[in-house]
């Protein structure tokens, strides 16, 4: 069997790559909208009605702790602003919005980057000062995620201010991937459970082999796929474009399975 030469590939591989990218984004849009819906319906309703103890109606590490005023306030701000950062992140990636309402794109972009930095700092505070963590290894994984959010968001911001728009676009996409790390983690965990029909390699404190791969992979794998997608899109190598398109298609399929698992197993039972 020989590897097909780029010219003998039957498809327009550039178009296939662009379409698989769009397909992945549509699946992510559905899954992140479900995440926003869950945050508002669960945390939003309980917080607005003063039922802070109700945060613990779902399994959490800490959530509401009676008497821990500072910890409860940071937790509330962190979970509620998670909805805002997710909405703004999605809006940044919708090309129609970016083209037609450039002013809105700039404002939601500023809010997204500022919220991303707040989410990372409040997350670090919860993990380190409040000591909300399941295991040391899962804490290290999410702290690395937080560092990447701080670095990528700052770079995306800096390039936008300096009007270096191509570099801004790349760093903003990288920032989107790492900010979505906690969402990817839920998708990855539940996708793995659905595919295997059991929590294979997982433990209650998230220190099993599958947990470790998925906690670091929740941002490293999407970042690696993004880099491949961007590199394949820029070059003229059709085999690379076709391979990247196949990988993104597989990622879209796994994301769809993960969204299904997350909604049915992780969120819907508590609404
Ligand atoms: C930037 C994107 C982030 C989003 C959208 C986000 C979202 C959330 C949400 C929705 C919760 C509530 C838990 C749940 O219902 O499942 C939560 C809790 C938490 N987050 Fe984040 N988070 C982000 C980043 C981070 C980072 C970077 C860290 C750590 C450095 C972090 C640490 C925590 C901790 C410790 C909790 C409390 C968990 C518990 O008590 O069970 N988060 N986050």
Image: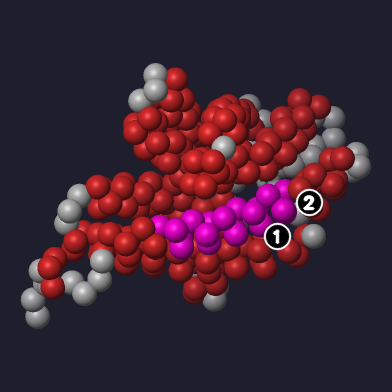
Q: Which residues are magenta?
A: 21-39
Within 8 Å: ligand 1 and the Cβ of disc 2? yes
For residue 216, say whether it is visible.
no
Q: Which of pointers 1 and 2 lies earlier in the amino acid sequence?
A: 2
Image spot of residue 176 (x, y percent): 48, 41
Disc number for residue 187: none
Q: Secondary structure at mark 2?
A: helix
Tag 2 residue: 42
Q: Is residue 253 visible?
A: yes
**Residue 267 badge:** 1
- State the residue at coordinates (79%, 52%): 41
Find the distance from the CA under tag 1 to the CA under tag 2: 9 Å
Query: What residue is shown at x 39% (from left), y 19% (from top)?
Result: 162
Q: Position of residue 136 (x, y in %)?
A: 51, 41
Mark 1 crowd level (few <14, some 14–19, many ≥20, 10 Å Cα): some
* Image quadrant in which you'd find residue 72: top right
**Residue found at the very far front of the displayed protein:** 100
31 or 268: nearer the viewer: 31
Residue in the picture at 36% in, 58% down: 18
x and y percent of residue 2 in the render? 8, 76
Disc 1 + disc 2, Cβ < 8 Å: yes
Q: Quadrant of residue 11?
A: bottom left
| Residue 190 included in the magenta stretch of the image | no
């Amino acid at each position: 069997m020989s590897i097909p030469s780029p010219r003998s590939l039957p498809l327009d591989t550039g178009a296939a790559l662009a379409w698989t990218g769009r397909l992945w984004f549509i699946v992510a849009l559905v899954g992140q909208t479900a995440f926003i819906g869950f945050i508002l319906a669960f945390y939003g309703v309980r917080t607005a009605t003063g039922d802070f103890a109700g945060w613990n109606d779902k399994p959490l590490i800490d959530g509401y702790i009676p008497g821990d005023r500072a910890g409860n306030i940071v937790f509330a701000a962190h979970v509620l602003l998670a909805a805002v950062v997710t909405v703004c992140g999605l809006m940044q990636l919708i090309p129609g919005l970016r083209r037609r309402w450039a002013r809105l794109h700039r404002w939601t972009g500023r809010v997204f980057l500022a919220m991303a930095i707040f989410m990372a700092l409040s997350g670090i505070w919860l993990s380190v000062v409040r000591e909300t963590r399941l295991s040391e290894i899962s804490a290290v994984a999410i702290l690395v995620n937080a560092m990447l959010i701080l670095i990528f968001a700052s770079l995306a911001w800096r390039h936008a201010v300096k009007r270096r728009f191509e570099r801004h676009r790349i760093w903003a996409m990288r920032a989107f991937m790492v900010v979505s790390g906690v969402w990817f983690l839920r998708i990855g965990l539940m996708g793995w459970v659905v595919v295997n029909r059991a929590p294979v390699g997982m433990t209650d404190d998230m220190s099993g082999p599958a947990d470790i791969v998925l906690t670091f992979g929740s941002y490293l794998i999407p970042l690696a796929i993004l880099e491949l997608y961007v590199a394949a899109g820029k070059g003229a190598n059709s085999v690379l474009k076709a391979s990247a398109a196949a990988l993104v298609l597989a990622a879209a399929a796994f994301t769809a399975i993960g969204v299904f698992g997350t909604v049915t197993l992780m969120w819907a039972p508590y609404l």
